[in-house]
Image: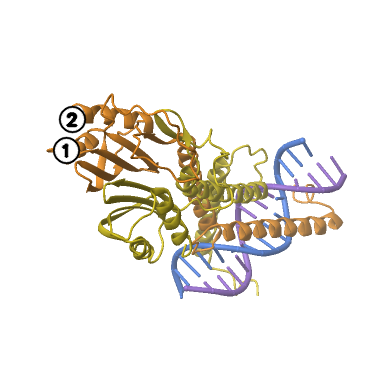
Chain colours: A yellow, B orange, C blue, D purple
Amino acid sequence: MVGSLTRAPLLAQEHVIAERKRRERISQSFLSLAALIPGLKKKDKNSVLGDAIEYLKQLQERKARLEEQVAKRTVESVKFVKKTTQFYEQDDQTSSYDENFDTQSKNPFPDIEARVSNKDVLIRIHCETNKGCISNIINEVEKLHLSVLNSNALPFGQATLYITIVAQMEDEFSMTLRDLVKTLREGLLSFM
Amino acid sequence: MVGSLTRAPLLAQEHVIAERKRRERISQSFLSLAALIPGLKKKDKNSVLGDAIEYLKQLQERKARLEEQVAKRTVESVKFVKKTTQFYEQDDQTSSYDENFDTQSKNPFPDIEARVSNKDVLIRIHCETNKGCISNIINEVEKLHLSVLNSNALPFGQATLYITIVAQMEDEFSMTLRDLVKTLREGLLSFM
DNA sequence: GAAGACACGTGACCC
DNA sequence: TGGGTCACGTGTCTT
């Protein structure tokens, strides 16, 4: 038993050396890992592993939360508009829930802006990228007796779309601008 | 030597058992750690440690970058708007506009609005149609260390132009959004 | 069969 | 004197 399964003496030495090398590499890795963990007091193997696990979980969680924040940032920026005399400023820190904001609808999109010049209408829409979004919007616009002359959709950020439409009033058109925006907004909300 | 420092036979067994327990805990920790590393192929001890180290560094870096981004995002959006009577109407969800217009004095153009999302910048300009207007504007934008990804100019009414530009910050870019708008506005005024 | 990884028991060392 | 951790050499199993 003893002699039969034992390695040849020459190889036995190599085996010892190889194992030594392996242990050395692992110890080194332990050291490197421990160096990355902030506020690590006990440096025994299991503590290093345990704290690494805990720290890693914590980092993953925080990273996820931050990414979520950054992703939502663009969306949130549209919700709140704070007004001063000459310019608009949107500041996330100062603009926590504004009284003027319509709190009923959670999603502020679509953000709609319209202007007129004689028979021409300019419509700007800021919304989330959506399947069939553009054609639906154009369809809604045409339902209001507006004939679209030109449209342009620019993707911006992760999932936002800036749409600009120039249209012309048909003879049947008789809405006020405010009603136009309201009607359009309601129409768009039905498929968003 | 050999016998003198050897443990008593009773304690020797406890020692073996304790060591077993310790090894078991470490192995378990290795397993838990490996479970936290995404896309980990080899699960040998040294690979787990090595990949954990790499992944941890990567997470720390990303977390730092995200926090920096979130911190920098104090001023999110700045919009310069001069209102004239027949032009501007707002949706209910934004604040009501006041009636203090200064219509006659100056040319309100160009109206400039800018937004950011990470390294992307959206610029919307409302100005009078002008010879070389568009190329001048793009030129001004590029002077600010912004590389234009997409631009669109829509004529509206008799002599007005709605321009939308999506650009990306180059490494040299370090302006606040407010300064960007101000600088751009001054640059554009020089040839209008 | 050669090379590598692992768990094991063991002696040493340290509060 | 214990109770804990470590490094070591070794046997075994897997490529």
Image coordinates for residue B132, horizontal then vertical, percent: 13, 38
- Say whether residue A188 is left or right of residue A174: right
- Chain of the residue on which disc 1 is drawn: B
Circles 2, 1 touching at the beta carbon (< 8 Å): yes
Q: Residue furthest top?
A: B105
Q: Residue at x 26, y 35 (%)?
A: B145
Task: Please tell me whether mark 1 sits on a helix, a strand or a loop.
Answer: helix
Image coordinates for residue B117, horizontal then vertical, percent: 40, 44
Q: Which of the two residues, A123 or A106, is positioned nearer the viewer here?
A: A123
Q: Residue at x 55, y 68 (%)?
A: A7
Q: Is residue A109 visible?
A: yes
Q: Residues within 10 Å of mark 1 (few under 14, many from 20)?
A: some
Q: Which of the two residues, B14 or A50, is positioned nearer the viewer here?
A: A50
Q: State how far apart marks 2 and 1 are (Cα).
A: 8 Å
- The residue that label 1 is drawn on is B133
- Chain of the residue on which disc 2 is drawn: B
- Say whether residue D10 is left or right of residue B137: right
Mark seen at residue A12: none
Image coordinates for residue A191, horizontal then vertical, percent: 46, 65
Image coordinates for residue A32, horizontal then vertical, percent: 53, 44
- The residue that label 2 is drawn on is B192
Q: Amino acid at mark 2?
A: Met
Q: Residue at x 33, y 43 (%)?
A: B122
Residue A102 drawn above or below residue A140? above
Task: Please tell me whether mark 2 sits on a helix, a strand or a loop.
Answer: loop
